[in-house]
Amino acid sequence: MKISTLILIFIIIYGCAGPTKINVAVTLNPRNPEVMSYRRLAVLPYSGRFGREFASKVEAMIIAQKDSSGNPYYSLVERAEVARIVDEMKFSTSYLVDQNTAVEIGKLLGARAIMVGSVNSFSVQDNPYQEKRVRCGQYQNNYIKGPYGPITIPVCIRWDPYYVNCVERTANMSVSSKIISVETGSIIYSSDYSDSEKSVACSDSGYAVKSSSELEYVVQNRILNNIKMDILPYKVDLSIVLKEDDDNIKNSKSREKFYSGLEFAKSNRLDRACELWKEAYETDKESVSLTYNLGVCSEAFGDPLLAQEYYKKADKLISKPDKIINDALFRISNIIKNKYKN
C-alpha cells in the first residue's frame, strides 16, 4: 500500500512537470582526424597584421585542450625555441607560410608537423548614419467625464519627423591556416575562415556601440573555435530526454526504484539514478523506459556502444515508432561514427 501511494505521488510530480532532461557533454573527434597522428607540432608566427598575436592564441588553445586523463593532445614545441630558430634564420613572417621554409624550420625544431598561417584581414570600421524618428509637434486637449468633473486627456494631432545620429561598427577578420608534414612536405590540413560582427547604436538607444576590442574578441574566438574543431577533439553539450512512464514494470520494488531514479536524475544525481535503474532492470527487462534510460546512462558516462545496444533493445520492445527512441538511435549512431572514424 505504501509503495502504491509513493508511485502515485511520483506520477503526479513528473506528469505535471515538463519532460526530465539531462545535459551530457560528448567529446567528438576533430573534423580532420588525420592531423592527430602528428602529435609533435610547432606553431609558427602567422603573417599579416596581428599575425603573431593570433598564432599565440592558436598555441594557447591547443595547450588548453586535454584528454580525459588530463594530457594535452599535442606535444608543442616551446614558443621560445620557435622564436630562436626563426630569428637565427632571419625569416620575416611572410616567408614562414612557404611550405619549403616551414619544413626546413620543422626539421630544426624536431617537429613532425608545422602549423603556419596568415591573418589576411583584420579591421574595424565605423559607418555613421541617421535614422528617422517622429515626435508629437502639437497636442489637443480632449475631455471625458469623470466622477469629480471633466478629465483632460492630451491627444497628439501632429507628428513631426526628426533624425538621430547612429553608428554601425563592424569587425572583419579573415585567417588562413595550414599544417604541413615535416617528413613529406605535404599539406595535411588547410582552412580559410572569415568572420564579422556588428554593433549598432544611436544617440537615443540608451547604450553605446560595442567597442572595437569587444567585436575583435568575438570574431577571433569564432575563428579559433572553428580551427579547434578542425584539429582537436571538442565537446558538444546535448540535452537528452529521459523516459518517465513505468511501462511494463511488473515488480513493485522495481517501479519504486524507477521513480526514485527519476527523482535523483532531477537532482543532478544521474550516478545514483543509473544504479537504481540497473537494479530494477535485472527483474524487469521488458520495460521500455528502464531499457532506454540505461541507454542514456551509458551515453552520459561515455560508452556509446553500450548505449546503442540499450537503445536498440528499447526499440525492439515497442510496437510503433517512438520519437524519443528514434532520436536516440540517430544521435548515438552519429556519435559512434565520429568517435571511431579513422
Image (cartoon, rainbow, N blue to C red):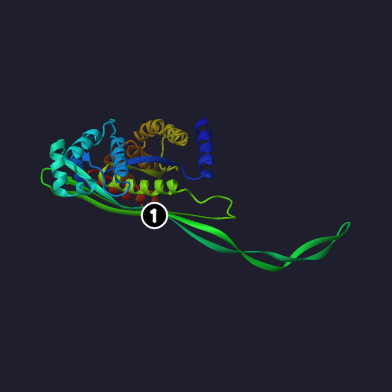
Q: Residue 78 versus residue 66: which sits nearer the camera?
A: 78
Mark 1 closeness class: few <14, some 14–19, many ≥20 residues within 10 Å = some
Q: Position of residue 337 (x, y in %)?
A: 25, 47
Q: Which quadrant holds residue 25?
A: top left
Looking at the picture, does residue 129 appear above or below residue 104? Answer: below
What residue is at 25 percent from the left and 44 percent from the top?
231
Q: Residue 273 versus residue 117: which sits nearer the camera?
A: 117
Q: Position of residue 285 (x, y in %)?
A: 34, 38
Q: Which quadrant holds residue 21?
A: top left
Q: Residue 219 versus residue 44: which sits nearer the camera?
A: 44
Residue ranking furthest to the left: 184
Amino acid tagged 1: Ser
Q: Position of residue 81 (x, y in %)?
A: 21, 34
Circle 1 sits in a helix, a strand or a loop, which is it? strand
Q: Position of residue 156 (x, y in %)?
A: 73, 66
Residue ranking furthest to the right: 148
157 left or right, relative to 149: left
Q: Is residue 181 visible?
A: no
Q: Which quadrant holds residue 241?
A: top left
Looking at the picture, does residue 329 appear above or below residue 283? Answer: below
Q: Residue 204 versus residue 292: which sits nearer the camera?
A: 204
What residue is at 14 percent from the left and 44 percent from the top?
103
**Residue placed under numbered mark 1 in the picture:** 196
